[in-house]
Image (cartoon, rainbow, N blue to C red):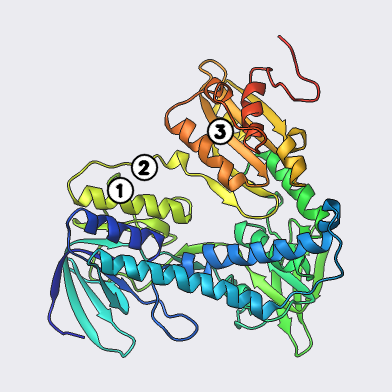
Amino acid sequence: MSSDSEQYDVLVIGAGPAGYVAAIRCAQLGLSVAVVEKWIDRQGNPVLGGTCLNVGCIPSKALLDSSERYHEINHAASAHGIKTGRVSMDVPAMLTRKDKIVQQLTGGIEGLFKANGIQWIQGYGRLLSDKKIAVINHASERAEYHGHSIILASGSVPIDIPVIPIDGQRIVDSSGALEFEDVPKRLAVIGAGVIGLELGSVWNRLGSEVIILEALDSFLPTADQQVSREAMKQFKSQGLDIRLSAKVTGSKATKKEITLTYESAQGKQKLPVDRVLVAVGRRPNTHDLIDESIELKRDERGFIDIDCNFMTSVTGVYAIGDCVQGPMLAHKGSEEGIAVAEVIAGQSASIDHNLIPWVIYTEPEIAWVGMSEQQAKKSGVNYKKGMFPYAATGRALAVNAPAGFVKVIAEADTDRVIGVHIIGRSASELIAEAVTVMAFAGSAEDIARTVHAHPTLSEALHEAALDADNLAIHKAAPKRR
């Protein structure tokens, strides 16, 4: 690496969904850009894409799809008149497919960098004073680079539990749970959040007995309570053993098994398992990111403080994505990447963080945007709601996916939609319509008067909007006014 300080209009640390999108948008706006990325794949090759593409969003969805197809063939094909013998899962082949998808997408980002003239600097980046970045590459060579503007997009890392040390083989974080070469007979998942539920679902479908230990006394507390209750019902019916108020206190590993100890309402408990997935959340990846000489403000959890234009306490240094406050979601980081690039280029940009959709890619899927009913009550909003079950839509029955419902919450006085909550097949796709309507301050009537194709799952959203005014057509016992 060169020891001279090379200069760019914009230097980005991190090539995940926040950083690589910011870099591309900066290049589109005519700025010279370089991106520092340290990621190395399992084969030892430098790669772009960060956590999301390499060990997060993309590989987990690949495994979710493979495991769902396997489960469908074994347990639901007969409902369609399809008769098969017992099928088996080739786990190594499933992992190979997952890896090919990851390689295709990470390679695609590399192609976009080349097409947009973005310099990829491979190595560990550290912010210095005077808007410089020191980079140590994988050969331990050091170089410095200078940027007129700096974007910190360092992402997040899994939270560790000291009483359960991760060994990367039998006790793993989310990355390790994507690489099991066989199906565990008994898998403990610590944490009933998005990661725990998704990866727990993968291995449960493939035949593992999955026990989820959640320290909180409530299930999916950030979701609408009606959605949470329905989700718990569906997951338990699938065989997931979800234990709430279960605080893990220790672990003991032998050659044969791992024994977890935890405390619950029933007192001290022991749980012998083959493998453990620790999925208690993620923390900002800001350790060693910033030189000690720089007074860049962070909160007690390590999140970088920013203003409404993503500027940190250091002029010319910006931060986006998981390393700043807000939901740790790839699409949130990407939108911030576009916005910060436009700010740096002298344009105006903003994001309504209240309109960022949340999705859990289980089956049924869970998605929501805006206020839950409990939040509306707590804030004193005078609201109305409409609900419609998937089981009453023709398409849901046709695809053998009757579980779930759509819930629309609107202001009673203005009819403006303030929240939409979906649990059911393709919820991740359906939520986009709700986000669009809310982004334009649309009403429940706007959705109700929009023609939705028949038969589609989107008709459930249409009917829920109608139901907000007691006008649902296909509800079993519609109210009349």
Task: Name which residue lies at 23% across and 48% down.
Answer: 343
Q: Is residue 16 left or right of residue 403?
A: left
Give percent across and percent down for residue 448: 58, 23
Task: Name which residue lies at 74% across and 12% down.
Answer: 480
Q: Is residue 449 left or right of residue 324?
A: right
Question: Does label 2 or label 1 sit earlier along the sequence?
Answer: 1
Q: Quadrant of residue 95?
A: bottom right
Q: Is residue 419 above or below residue 198?
A: above
Task: Name which residue lies at 50% across and 71% down.
Answer: 102
In which quadrant of the rendered image does the N terminus lie? bottom left
Q: Amino acid at mark 2?
A: Ile
Q: Amino acid at mark 1?
A: Ala
Query: In terms of secondary structure, where does tag 3 sit?
Result: strand
Q: Quadrant of residue 67?
A: bottom right
Decide: few, some or many residues near mark 1? Use Cα within 10 Å; few <14, some 14-19, many ≥20.
many
Question: Does label 3 or label 1 sit earlier along the sequence?
Answer: 1
Q: What is the C-alpha distance between the residues marked 3 and 2?
A: 17 Å
Q: Viewer-proximal residue, 228 or 294?
A: 228
Give percent across and percent down for residue 423: 67, 43
Q: Is residue 406 left or right of residue 12?
A: right
Are dots 2 and 1 in contact, CB under 8 Å? Answer: yes
Task: Name which residue lies at 58% across and 47% down.
Answer: 428
Circle 2 sits on which residue? 351
Circle 1 sits on which residue? 339
Q: Is residue 383 above or below residue 42?
A: above
Circle 3 sits on which residue? 419
Give percent across and percent down for residue 74: 82, 64
